[in-house]
Amino acid sequence: MDTLRGGRDGRDGGHGRDGWRPPSEVRNIVRDSTIEYLVQAGWIQGDLVVNLPPPREPVDTAAEELARSVRAQWSAEVAAWELGDFEGPLAVRWLARWGTTAPAGTAEPPTRPARSDRLGDIADTLLDLDARRLLVLGGPGSGKSTLLAMTVVLLAGRHLGDVTRRMPGDRGVPVPLLLSLESWDAESVGLRDWLVGRLTEDHPGLPRVTGAHPARRLVRDGRVLPVLDGLDELPDHRRAAVVRELNATPRELGFVLASRTHEYRTLDVRVTGASDIEALPVGPRDAAVHLLRTADEQRHERWGPVLDELADHPEGPLGQALSTPLMIWLARRAHRPAHTEPARLADRTRLPTREAVERHLMDTVVPAAFEPRAHDTERLHAPGHWNPARARGWLAFLARELERRRTGEFAWWRLNRARAARLLAMPTLVALCIVLAESMMAIVTRVEDTYGDSPQFDHDVFDRNYLFGAAVMATGIQLTTLQWYGDRFWEPRRRANPFKAGAALRSASRAASVRRALTSLAILVVPGALLLLMAQGAYESDAFTAQAVLGYILPALVMLVIAAPADTVDAATPDELLASERRAGLLTLGVVAPLIGLGSGAHSLLTGHGTVDFWVAFAKGVTGAVIVLVAVSPWCLWVVSKAWLAVLGRVPWSLMEFLRDAYGGGLLQRYGGTYRFRHLRLQEHLAGHPAAPLPAASTTVGPRQPLTVTGPRQPRPAAPPPRLSEVLDSPPPLHELRGHTVVSNDDEYVVDARDRRLPLGHWPLCGLFMVLAAVRMAATGNWDNALGWTSVLFWPALAAFVNLVAFLLPKMHLTLRIDHRGIVASRGRRRAAYPWEDVLAVRVRQVYVRGRDQRVYGPHVRLRPGAPEPPWMFRGRDGWYLVMALHFRESVPPDLAGALTRFSGGRWQG
């Protein structure tokens, strides 16, 4: 609020009453102000003139909110990385080639050095380019991700300005968005559409711009600058697709792309029209200066042997190891505790090679990250008070899980996918549900027998089924929600807020497709309509109507809102995501379950029972609903999985606190709602997979190789030997499989096979009905009744019978033919033909059937627009069509890969 008082230029001459006179000159003009309230006090003369700036457009407000959130998020992340002084970080030298036009008489644009400690110069040069396209190259641990994060903070700050330094914001600076390429399928989605989706949909860690229109304006007008990291972590065909899509992007939308040099230069395509900077090895002098500057003054003498070794032997093992920012940070972080001795790094007898130095640093950084710190009495464990040996074992388990799933992001809601948790979590939940049902039945039965209003009425046939009926209704509600949200049903839910129902409805509408929404409505409407129709012809129809509406239809609608996926504004960290899911679970427990119980209680009350019977039926209904709704929630699965893994010693009991301390110690990074290891090399080291040896560092800069291909392409460098897990995951040649006949020559590749049907999709549904039958038996208390056990065992027997019938049926005939004309595949009576003139690309993808990703992979084709589509059983997702399902890993047999290479004409992207 600004206060404006009328002023005058003359002096007070004592005129008027009490010697006061009106001002001779009045200033009632306000120009270019951002005030919200204006108060004028005193003698008011003349008109008040307020010249305010024009109102801001929604896109400007959206850009400012996005920049503010991005700066806050990545400023905290950079601070947690402990990079030293942000104003003067490690002086990493880069070889920059700005612009795309070479001077006359030269083969390529000139190169000039750049430094990461002069980040403003790099940002200024990038913003002055006509095409804001920058390629950041470097070896493993060379500081690419650090440069990207610091650039994001700098550009977001320039967009907002700095009030303390009186630096106005610059709307011409695009808002940077640091994104991982792992979530972009460039073969199916364009860059613009992907960015709009990341801005409008609920993706952990990315601020959401309200409404699709401002988001599209931001992307269309080039108001955002995508900063893309992790190109080298993608498979070859996905890297090429990313580069091709970036080349097709309009020049108004710039981007920054980071990749390892080797992985980028071995691609068949190059980023066109882009400047590039490439990291150079850190010199021994720069490394020594940084280590000395970031160390405590009391420990400068202990770093003396290290500095002497770097000065005397710059090409020695220590000098080569400390040529990357990652190893320099590890050396600084591992020897920060007072009890550590940095001089051991200079011992060439113990650490004779560069690899030995790097392994030593990655081993010693774990104990140093958990050094004791000040204890907060509100925490279960003091920060850092973890046993270093056990902490390493816990981190190794997480690293092995990430390696097994071939990902770099650890999400707490996927902890139940660990093998031990997968085997033990579900039986534990079933046992807990049975115990809960038995306990509740014992309590309500005692209350009913003691205080029942109608003791002459036999409740065994009717009232004891309230629990089972509520469980059945809750199952229908869960199936409705599962169909609506698809695979996102198992992700954390948004922060439940009864005052933000509109946001929840928007989130729910974005998460569902038309087909899934219609299926969900069918699951909701058909049983509800049948219940209402049955109620019209039944005795006490009002009771059945009330139970159908209160116990099924209304809770299902509320559950669709509560189960909306997590909102990025509300949940930007793993702890906030967990708090949101916990809150959604409590809201389910406090709203949806009581609604189902109210339906059971209303049925009891409207059928002539008393008040006590109403509360008994209500308690039974709530219990049946809790068994299904809460026990199968992501939060409950997380708790049970974490408990079992803690019992087995795989993770600590306070896993989130441990991850938070590991993040505070610099071992982990936080990308929105997930954690990542500080570097992929650290993850591979902890998982027991040695990294490929790095080339020797050199402090001299020779002539730079151009990135454009002007002549015959050079052969690719020899790839490192495959890991054991990759060998085990590779499928054998098809001719070695039983029942497969393969004919392969220069003209054709034909596979003829017969495969037995092995249906598995019915087992989860039969298992669910088996659990419900067990709950019903617990509700009736008929543990010694053979009929009750028959109803429980009937469902697994039915599932096994279905598999037996499928096994006895004749084998399905499978054929695959690949030649110069195209691909022809058949499965039973269904046949699909893909002529090469209609095929744009061939690659391995996950099989997609009935709206869900299956656990098998196989080659798929992408057809040109207008090409005839195959039968429905061959149709995948995102415009891809199945050829044949082959393996449970993302790979194909070598003989099939060779045939695709021979006949596809370059379309095969294996």
Image (cartoon, rainbow, N blue to C red):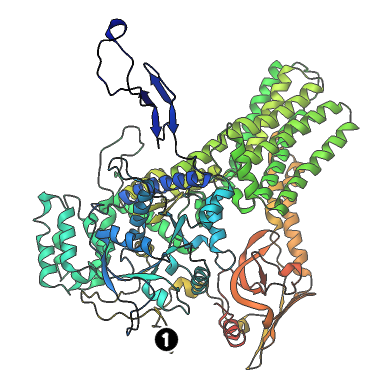
Query: Is any part of residue 433 visible from this angle?
Result: no
Q: Nearest the camera: 701 or 436?
A: 701
Residue 249: in sight, yes or no? yes
The spot of residue 550 in percent (x, y) is 74, 30
Q: In x, y percent, where is residue 129?
A: 38, 65
Q: Which of 43 and 284 is in front in this view?
A: 43
For disc 1, the marked residue is 710
Q: In which quarter of the image is the C terminus?
A: bottom right
Q: Which residue lies furthest to the bottom in this view?
A: 746
Task: Measuring from the top left, give residue 44's x and y in whole percent.
Answer: 40, 18
In the figure, is residue 776 to the left or right of 51? right
In the figure, 174 relative to 20: above or below? below
Disc 1 secondary structure class: loop
Q: In which quarter of the image is the N terminus?
A: top left
Q: On the picture, is 112 further left or further right than 747?
A: left
Instruction: Answer with the quarter of the image where residue 72 lies.
Output: top left
Q: What type is the residue that disc 1 sits on?
A: Thr
